[in-house]
Image (cartoon, rainbow, N blue to C red):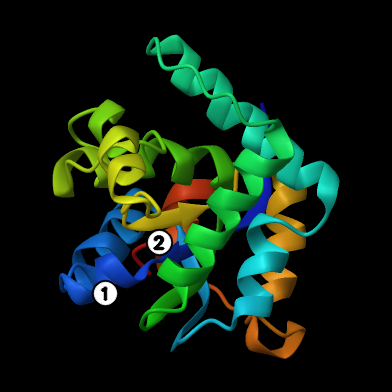
Amino acid sequence: MKFQKEKTLVLIKPDGVQRSLVGEIISRFERVGLKIVALKIFIPTKEQVIQQYGPNRKEIEALGKRSIEKQAQKGIKIKKPPYEQGMEIVNRLKKFMTAGPVVGMVLEGNQAVAVVKKIVGATEPLSSDVGTIRGDFTIDSYSIADFDKRAVRNLVHCSASKKEAEREIKIWFKPEEILEYKLIGEKILYDVNLDGILE
């Protein structure tokens, strides 16, 4: 399989910033060989959060349906229709994501979307494997978040697909904020011929 250069979005959420985990989280992506091509700290607007998580009715219904299905797997029956459940999640995310600073970054590398998802872990921290960001640094769960009527505090958002990454990057970054440059480490990771690397 040939090198598949991709860009993906990562947001370190307010809980990750407040717990001083920014450096630790960024280092996990750098250590695997991903390149940071954009990075900034900001407080999201409600409009940006809506664009990110619930840009239209179809997306909100899909979000609600996924939530209902996940709860059903745990034996919890939600009686709300998918749209209503989805809107509740979006409203909780609006409150959470605008509560404080967020660190946003665009990462680039071979199959960056899948690599980042693997490093971040499952959406619910309680279900995330040891060794992932969510599995190692938080024990929040959907049940606790639902009981408290808040968004799950899972430290990081990452794009779920290449198409989603392309859409989401545009919400948080202007084209001129995304840099093109070379890292020495890319030669080790991607170049077929390493002749003369020490010259």
Q: Within the image, what quadrant is residue 48 found in?
A: bottom right
Q: Which residue is mark 2?
A: 185
Label 2 residue SS: helix
Question: Upstream in the sequence, badge 1 or badge 2?
Answer: 1
- The amino acid pointed to by label 2 is Gly
Q: Nearer the viewer, mark 1 or mark 2?
A: 1
Give percent across and percent down for residue 22: 25, 71
In this picture, residue 156 sits left or right of residue 134: right
Residue 130 coordinates in the image, percent (x, y): 18, 31
Q: Residues within 10 Å of mark 2 (few under 14, many from 20)?
A: few
The amino acid type, in three-letter code, at marker 1 is: Val
The crowd level at tag 1 (other Cα within 10 Å; few <14, some 14-19, many 20+) is some
Query: Is residue 158 found left or right of 5 in the rendered image?
Result: left
The residue under the point 54% across, 73% down is: 182
**Image marks 1 and 2: residues in contact by CB distance under 8 Å:** no
The image position of residue 113, as x and y in percent, is 58, 45
Point out which mark residue 186 bears. none
Q: Secondary structure at mark 1?
A: helix
Q: Is residue 196 in sight in this rendering?
A: no
Residue at the spot x=38%, y=79% of the render?
99
**Quadrant the N terminus occupies:** top right
